Structure formats: structure tokens, C-alpha cells
Image: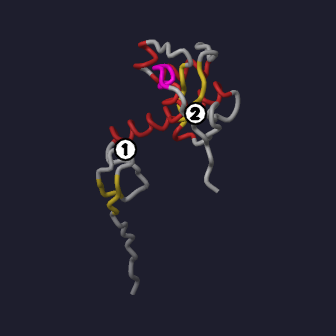
């Protein structure tokens, strides 16, 4: 007597990578819907564009020009003279693409960590005397 084996797939509850909503999945999907997937993929592409733009500005591996911090999660592009156009403020994707392609000069840009960028802003307002040091954990 032959028995047929049936393959059952277990439905797993997992959190959507974009909105954190729980959903059941039998496959390797990361998102609960095609809308969340599109937004998640767009965010990943923007993250890569940001990193590539920072590498171009830094002329190598990005790190803070003040303290040497190299944690990409806290690095930012700083406008040295604080002359940000409205278009750059509204569309960071286009800003990064223009930097990578060379359409936007990088002479007035630098890479700073969040703390040093805050220090730059405070110095522009007239507050001074602050010191920031980067000491990576070992």
C-alpha cells in the first residue's frame, strides 16, 4: 500500500520590514503588501545613494572631518556655508544623484557626524567652546 506524502508549509507570523505590521507568510517576503515592498525598496535605494554620495564627498571612505567618526548611521552631509537650496531640502534623492554624477559641486560640502554637525550649527549661532572627540568602542 503506497502512501502519498503531503508537503505542508507552515504559515509564519512576521513583522513587515517597512511598517512592522504582522502578516502571515509562506515564502520569503519581507513586506506585508506590494505598497510596503515598494516603499521598503525605495528606502534601501536611497540609503545606497546616500552612501555613494558621501564616498564622493569624502574622496574615499566617509568619516567625520572633525572627530573621525566612521559610523555611517550617524554621518551627515554638511553644507559648510549653510546655503541649502529649497530643491535640495525637498528632494534628497536628486541631491545625492547630482553629487554622484558630478552635476553638483562638492566644494561646499563636508561629512560630519550628527554631534559635530550640531556643533557647526551652534558655532554659526555664536555659541562656542565645545569639544567633541570620537572614541570607538573596542
Left or right? Give the position of 105 relative to 59: left
Instruction: Judge the density around disc 1: few (<14), some (14-19), many (≥20) Cα neighbours within 10 Å.
Output: some
Q: Nearer the viewer, residue 76 or 133?
A: 133
Q: Nearer the viewer, residue 88 or 6?
A: 88
Q: Position of residue 121 (x, y in %)?
A: 48, 24
- Say if 6 sits above or below 130 in the image: below
Give the mark toward the camera: 2 or 1: 2
Residue 23 position by quadrant: bottom left
Q: Secondary structure at mark 2?
A: helix
The residue identified by callout 2 is 51
Q: Is disc 2 in contact with disc 1, using a CB cutoff of under 8 Å?
A: no
- Say if 93 sits above or below 36 in the image: above
Q: CA distance from mark 2 to mark 1?
A: 20 Å
Residue plotted at (35% across, 67% down): 10
Residue plotted at (64% across, 24% down): 57
Q: Position of residue 21 (x, y in %)?
A: 29, 50
The residue identified by callout 1 is 18
- Say if 30 sits above or below 122 in the image: below
Amino acid at each position: 500500500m503506497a502512501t502519498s506524502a503531503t508537503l505542508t508549509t507552515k504559515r509564519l507570523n512576521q513583522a513587515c520590514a517597512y511598517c512592522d505590521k504582522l502578516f502571515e507568510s509562506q515564502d520569503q517576503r519581507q513586506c506585508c503588501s506590494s505598497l510596503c515592498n515598494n516603499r521598503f525598496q525605495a528606502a534601501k535605494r536611497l540609503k545606497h545613494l546616500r552612501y555613494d554620495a558621501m564616498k564622493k564627498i569624502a574622496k574615499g571612505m566617509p568619516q567625520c572631518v572633525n572627530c573621525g567618526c566612521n559610523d555611517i548611521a550617524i554621518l551627515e552631509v554638511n553644507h559648510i556655508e549653510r546655503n541649502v537650496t529649497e530643491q535640495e531640502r525637498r528632494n534628497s534623492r536628486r541631491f545625492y544623484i547630482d553629487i554622484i554624477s558630478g552635476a553638483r559641486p562638492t566644494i561646499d560640502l563636508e561629512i560630519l557626524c550628527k554631534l559635530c554637525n550640531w556643533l557647526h550649527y551652534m558655532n554659526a549661532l555664536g555659541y562656542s567652546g565645545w569639544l567633541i572627540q570620537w572614541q570607538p568602542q573596542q
